[in-house]
Amino acid sequence: MKRHSMRSSLLLVFASVSFCLSAFAQPPSASDDPVLQAMQVEMQRSKAQLKLEEMSAPFYIDYRVIDVDEFNAEAAYGAVRTNVRTRLRFLKVVVRVGDYKQDSFFGQGEGVSDLIPVDDGVLAIRHQLWLATDRAYKAATEALTAKQAQLKQLTVDQPVDDFAPA
């Protein structure tokens, strides 16, 4: 039984088309892209309002969204056997508390990952961003406390800043 996979040829066609289209594409503005719009609104809200009582406010917030649109097809003897499309959006949120000399990027403070909706609903995307930001902030405050406790047990001859403003 001879099997022929169309995946490599489809990927080659996709790569060629996407390369040609990306050369002429304009960068998206917030009004055109619902994901970017939701990210900007939530970033402004988080910078202005995200702070728990007796905890330091975040000095750095990072949102990353990876949009995956994958198509896989397989054929045998000229007939399509598998035809699967997968669409996902991964979200990675990093919130840093403390300061540039000593921050929370340690252990569970390295951020949280989640999925966000693929239907371009700005309110639904904002809701997921808010939930992930809240979880990342709480994890960052706990990570900073744990990091400070561990550092008290060590002597450091030449301290190095955790993060750089650049």
Image (spheres, rainbow, N blue to C red):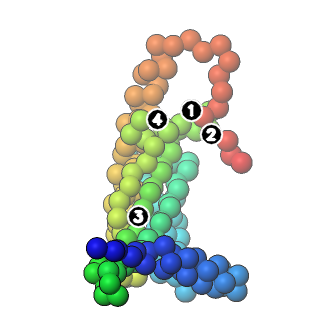
Is tag 2's residue or tag 1's residue first in the polypeptide sequence? 1
Between the C-alphas of marks 4 and 2, the distance is 12 Å
Q: Percent position (x, y) of residue 128?
A: 35, 66
* Image quadrant assignment for residue 140: top left
Residue at coordinates 64% horizontally, 85% vertically from top-left? 21
Assign a secondary structure to mark 1: loop
The residue closer to the viewer here, 84 or 142, is 84
* Crowd band around label 4 with a 10 angstrom C-alpha radius: few (<14), some (14–19), many (20+): some
Is tag 2's residue or tag 3's residue first in the polypeptide sequence? 3
> What's the residue type where badge 2 is placed?
Phe
Image position of 68 with respect to 24: above or below = above
Residue at coordinates 43% horizontally, 41% vertically from top-left? 109
Dot 1 corresponds to which residue?
102
Assign a secondary structure to mark 3: strand
Residue at coordinates 60% horizontally, 34% vertically from top-left? 162
Residue at coordinates 53% horizontally, 36% vertically from top-left? 103
Between the C-alphas of marks 2 and 1, the distance is 8 Å
Between the C-alphas of marks 3 and 4, the distance is 22 Å
> What's the residue type where badge 1 is placed?
Gln
* Crowd band around label 3 with a 10 angstrom C-alpha radius: few (<14), some (14–19), many (20+): some
Between the C-alphas of marks 2 and 3, the distance is 25 Å
Q: Percent position (x, y) of residue 160?
A: 66, 27
Q: Is residue 85 visible?
A: no
| Pointer 3 with pointer 4, Cβ within 8 A | no
Give the left or right position of residue 10, taking residue 102 as reference.
left
Q: Is residue 68 visible?
A: yes
* Crowd band around label 1 with a 10 angstrom C-alpha radius: few (<14), some (14–19), many (20+): some
Residue 90's tag is 3
Dot 2 corresponds to which residue?
163
> What's the residue type where badge 3 is placed?
Phe
Image position of 143 with respect to 93: above or below = above
The residue closer to the viewer here, 142 or 76, is 76
